Amino acid sequence: MELEHPEPFAARWRARWVWDRPPAIAFETMSKPVDADPTDHVALFRRVVVLEVVPASAPARIWVDGRHVLRVNGVEVARGPVRSEPRQAHYDVVDLAPHLVVGENVIAIVARRFGTPTSWWVPVPPSYSLGVGSLAFEAVIGDEWVVTDRSWRAVPGEAWTPVALPDGPAALPLEWFDARNHPYGWDRPGFDDTAWGKAFEITPVHGGGGASMHPPSEPFGMLRPPVRGAFPGGDRHEASLLERRTIPVGAAGADPVRSVHDAEAGTVEGEPAEAERMLFDLGRTAAGTVSLRVTGAAPGAIVDVAASEHLDRTGRIAPLGQLAGFRYVCRGGESTEAFETLEVIGTRYLLAVVRTPEGSPAPELGLAVDDRLRPRPEGASFECSDPLLNRVHSVGLRTVDLCALDAYVDCPTREQRAWTGDSVVHQMVDLTSNPDWSMAIWHPQLAVAPRTDGMLAMAVASDFAAADQMFIPDWPLHWLHSVHNLYRYTGDRDLVAELLVPAERMMRWFESYLGDDGLLHDVSGWVLVDWASVYVSGCSSILNGLWARALEELTEMARWLGNEGTAVWADRRYEGVKGGFDVFWDEGRGSYVDHVVDGVARRPMSQHAGAAALAAGLVPADRVGRVLDRILDRSRLLRHSFVMYPSTPDGPDDGHMYVALGYPEPTWDVEEAVIEAEPFFRYLVHDAVARAGRPELIADLCRDWKVFLDAGHESWPECWTGGTNCHGWSSTPTRDLIVHTLGITPAEPGYASVRVVPNLGDLVWARATVPTPHGPVTVEAHADGRLVVDSPVPVVRR
């Protein structure tokens, strides 16, 4: 899409690139500059602006290669930027005017560069001078442009000590903040910054390029307009102190979270000492920056805090791979001191271990989490005659909210990665239940990070994408469904046309695996499908079904855009899958087996196989009823996952080895049992039921989520058993009660008209208000046939 930079900003910035020090560039060869100091680094920048009059508005934009907190006169006004691939960065825009005063004003920026790849940040290959720490800021304040240059003062953030990223796929960047080394008051007027140095202006030099001091510059290229605010403020969740006791500990290690875990496990190394253990409970999962209040601390007292979404049966935190937290070293000498983390932490429990200097009393602590979630404004709703389904719908909303940070993430507690496939459920919930579609529209664009062969990364803008050690070939097929959602809900031709270019390349990637039978065979990568125990080796019915659905959707979008060449290719490949799919059919059991190996149909059967076939329209009409009966027969359904089961809150099992080695032979009666889909894949199961002509069944299917409510969950877990306690991909009932039960969908792209075909099942009534580009549509349906629709666009009832 053509980039439009908001007024008064142009593509070429007036700001200069700055950092608190010269670039630390080394050279492996003359043509390969590298970061000479790839460690976590925080820098502080300030600029004084004196005003005689406060303007009505003072637009500003900012970008940092990492994270930033922008403050005016000590008040936070922006935090960001949104995650992105390093060459597709989006700056933030904010109005400074509400925070300005007559007289002296201070614009202050905390900038953090992580150094090594994280769950949400990837370093760029540096040029000869740019790409190892950089900031650009500019604002129009009255008649003056305030831009980053040597007029700014800057110092290293010496209060922050770099902490090595913990080992493990679920580790998040940690903080170590020593309040004794922080220049308090630096972000407010009246601070003496004469001892600070001038900001270092970076001259962007690269092979063959010019040396303009202003963005856009290589290696970042064009800094793009904002897609949305990154981390808006929100509600505060105060934690309650559950337990406090004295425990033996060893010395505080270099990793604050590991130090807490060691103390919790009773590990004491070196000279033993005593510490205060304080366990806090937020009451339910929250996601945001953690605020710490310390009262009565001695100088140098160490507060280590670790997050955990679980407690084990003894009341101890059970990390289950969650490695998030921070260290705060107390300033002392004052009654109360406060600290707020730079990064978002998702958790329910916070365990603090406080080590005090000998002879000093332990301080009092207070902990809270301040929401840093994308907004969900008022204006959408759902309610029906079943209180259980009302609760299911609302918990799904909250779960997606908690997984909507600067991007849709798998979970806020453990990874915070933007997985390419997970987000399709988050997106569909927002399109039906959130008047703010900004993230629903933007996230499919974020996820376009193709390799040279066209395959998309499994988790975009992350360490996983940077390493490219593994990919999930079926995840881009769910991503293509999210593009299809954009086509149907927004009708934005330019956006869909842009995304269909990488979509077609991705779809053509699969051609190398096509056999003469029109089916995909032996597809490489990690064919995940779902955490359920489904078999995908050889020729997978499930993967072929997902590819067929994507081909059908690609055909539809290409024809809408007038791209007949792509449509003909995709339709031909779809017909090839349809023609060969019968190899998976089991006449005796009335559905499709999971896979065929060396020409032999294997016996395992799952909901996934039948659902993928139905959702893709691959099932002949005379078989549809049989397939639906088989995959919905609760007496045959078996919940089983070699990976997640039998994980417990006491710790993980070794099932994750099957991710690499493949699943063992079935341990169940494969002739009778049908493996049930986990919560993520249920969105496709429900779509299959609807396409099979039985949408009235879906309200009752959504009652399966009661198992989570009975267990006390207030957000949806990752799987029926095991995994994290907050996973947005499990929220499909929130969409389905609107799309399938009330039957509210776009009848034409962009909601030029709306289709309303209620299928209430056993409900007496249901009503909803859903967002559209033209205003809200409100529908109230009753079992006796009464239907009231209030719509700004024509209504189609078929």
Image (spheres, rainbow, N blue to C red):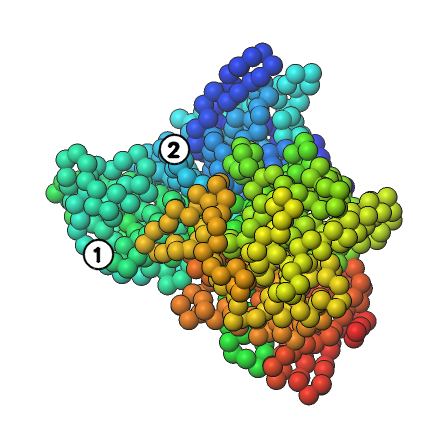
Q: Residue 276: where, in percent of width, then height?
A: 20, 49
The answer to whether residue 280 is left or right of residue 81 is left
Mark 2 burial class by Cα count in 10 Å: few <14, some 14-19, many 20+ = some
As shown in the figure, which amino acid type bears the numbered disc 1? Arg
| Residue drawn where x is 52% and y is 26% of the image | 132
Quadrant of the image containing the C terminus: bottom right
- Answer with the quarter of the image where residue 142 lies: top right
- The answer to whether one can see residue 356 in this image is no
Where disc 2 sits, the SS reads loop
Measuring 76% from the left and 54% from the top, which residue is drawn there?
578
Name the one closer to the observer, 226 or 51: 226
> What label sits on residue 164 in the rendered view?
2
Q: Are marks 2 and 1 in contact (CB under 8 Å)?
A: no
Q: For the residue marked with disc 2, what is the amino acid?
A: Ala
* Residue 767 point in image, percent of width and height: 64, 77
Front in this rendered view, residue 308 or 37:
308
Q: Which disc, if any, is residue 171?
A: none
Q: How far across and down, in percent of the image, does residue 606 sit?
A: 57, 59
Taking the image as shown, residue 654 lies to the left or right of residue 482, namely: left
Residue 78 horizontal side relative to residue 170, left or right: right
In front: mark 2 or mark 1?
2
Mark 1, Cα crowd under 10 Å, few <14 / some 14-19 / many 20+, is some
Q: Is 689 drawn above or below residue 544 in the view shown?
A: below
**In the displayed structure, would residue 26 be above or below residue 396?**
above
Q: Which residue is mark 1?
A: 244
